[in-house]
Image (cartoon, grey):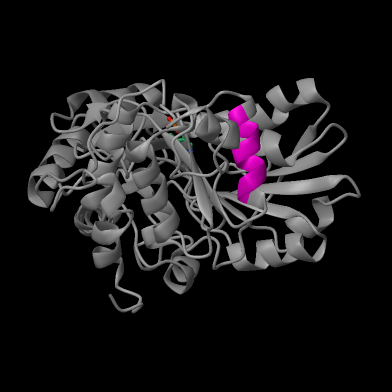
Amino acid sequence: MSDKVHKPATRVVEAGRKKAWTSVPGNKGGVVSPPVWRASTHLYEDCEDLAAGRPNEDGHFYYGRRGGPTQWALADALTALETGADGTELFPSGVAAIACTLMAVLRPGDELLVTDNAYEPTRSIALSMLRQFGITAKPFDPLEPDGLASAITDTTRAVMLESPGSLTMEVCDIPALCDVARERGILSIIDNTWATALGFAALQHGCDISVMSLTKHVGGHSDVMMGSASAAKPVINRIRRQAQFMGQVVSPDDAALALRGLRSMQVRLERSTKTALELATWLETRAEVSAVLCPMLPGAPGHDLWRRDFKGGCGLFSIVLADGFDSAARARMIDALDLFGIGFSWGGFESLAIPFDPAPVHTLRPWPPGIDTGSGLGVRLSIGLEDAEDLIGDLAQGLDAMGAK
Ligand SMILES: *Cc1c(COP(=O)(O)O)cnc(C)c1O
C-alpha cells in the first residue's frame, strides 16, 4: 500500500481496519468489520506470559476493562481520522469524555477557562463538579478578541473550547484562541462533536485535545451512547491513565454500533449539510424568523470563519423567532411538526426540534453579535436524512400554527 493521504470519504472507510482484528490466525481471508469480542477475562499463554505483562496501549489482550479488538478498531479509526493524534480513549458518553479529560489535565489549585457558549453539562462540570477537587473555572467570551487573553491568570492550565457553540452556533477563531493559550503554556481542549474530525481538523488548527460525543454523528442512528478523546503523546497517555483510574470502558456491542455508524458518516454529513442549507435558506425568507444561526449559510454569523477553517458542516442549526411571538406560540410550532421529533441529542438519521433560551447557559453574551434576536426565543433543529422538500413543508405548517404575531 502507498502512504498516499486519501480523501476523507476514503479514510472513513479504511480507518482502523487491521487484519488482526478481522481474521483468525492460520485461516485465509477474514471479515470486513471486527466481530463483537465480548470479554471480561483475557487469557495468557502461560505464567511467564502473565508475569511479563503487556504494553499499556490498545491492541494487546490484558483484561476486559482495557477493551478488545472491537473497541480497539473504533479507537484506531478515530485516531486515524484525527490528524496529529497518537491515540484515542473511548468513554461511555460524551459527558464522561469531557469530565474525565478535564480531570486528567487539571490538578487542585488550577483554573479552567470555559467558553461561554459551551454545552450546558460542560459548563456544569467546569463550574460545579471540578470545584470538589479544588479546581476553579471561569467562563470567557470566545468572540471578544481579547476575551481569552484577559481572562488568563497565573493558575490557568486549560481552556475548554467549542465551535460552533451549543445552541447559538457562534464560530470562534480557534487557531487564534489556541495560539493565545499555547503562548502561555495552557492546554486547549475542543468539543468537536458538531464538525467531527471530517469537518474540522482540530489538532491541526492548534487544539491539544479533541473530544467528541460519538452519540451524535458517529453513532448516527440514535441508538448508542459513547464519547472519545483524541490527542498526541504525552497528553493522550494522561487521559488514558485517568480513564483507567476511573474504570471507564465501553461495551464491544456499543463499539461495533459506533464503528458501523462511522463508516457512513461522511455521506450522512454531506447529505444533512445540503438539506440543512436548503432549509436555512428558506427559513431566512420567513417573516416569523428573525435570525438563522447556521454557519454554512452565506451571510449568517460565523460563516466567514467557518469557510476559512472547516471542511464540512452538518445538519444542526438554530433559528430565533421574530419579535411578537411568545413561548406558547413557539410550543404550538414545535408541537405541530410531524417529521421533527422533540428530543435532546442530534446527529441521527431523523430530524429533531427543541426549544431553547440561551440566557441561563450563556451568561456573558447570550446571542452572537449583529443579529436581530427578535423575541429571544430559540428553536434548535437537527436535520436528518429525510427529503428536503418534505421537511420544508413540515416547517411551513409548523410556522403557520404559531398564528399572527
Ligand atoms: C450531546 C453533546 C455532548 C454530550 O454527549 P453525550 O454522549 O450525550 O454524553 C457533548 N457535547 C456536545 C456539543 C453535545 O451536543
Q: Position of residue 165 (x, y in %)?
A: 51, 47
Q: Which residue sits at x=32%, y=44%?
A: 218
Q: Which residues are magenta?
A: 236-244
Residue 321 found in image quarter? top left
Using the image, determine if residue 84 lies above or below residue 154.
below
Image quadrant containing the N terminus: bottom left
| Residue 265 visible somewhere in the drawing | yes
Using the image, determine if residue 41 lies above or below residue 19.
above
Q: Which residue sits at x=77%, y=55%?
A: 186
Q: How many marks?
A: 0
In the visual, does 277 lie left or right of 231? left
Image quadrant containing the C terminus: top left
| Residue 361 visible somewhere in the drawing | no
Seen from the viewer's position, the closer of residues 87 and 260 is 87
Q: Position of residue 403 (x, y in %)?
A: 23, 30
Seen from the viewer's position, the closer of residues 166 and 5 is 5
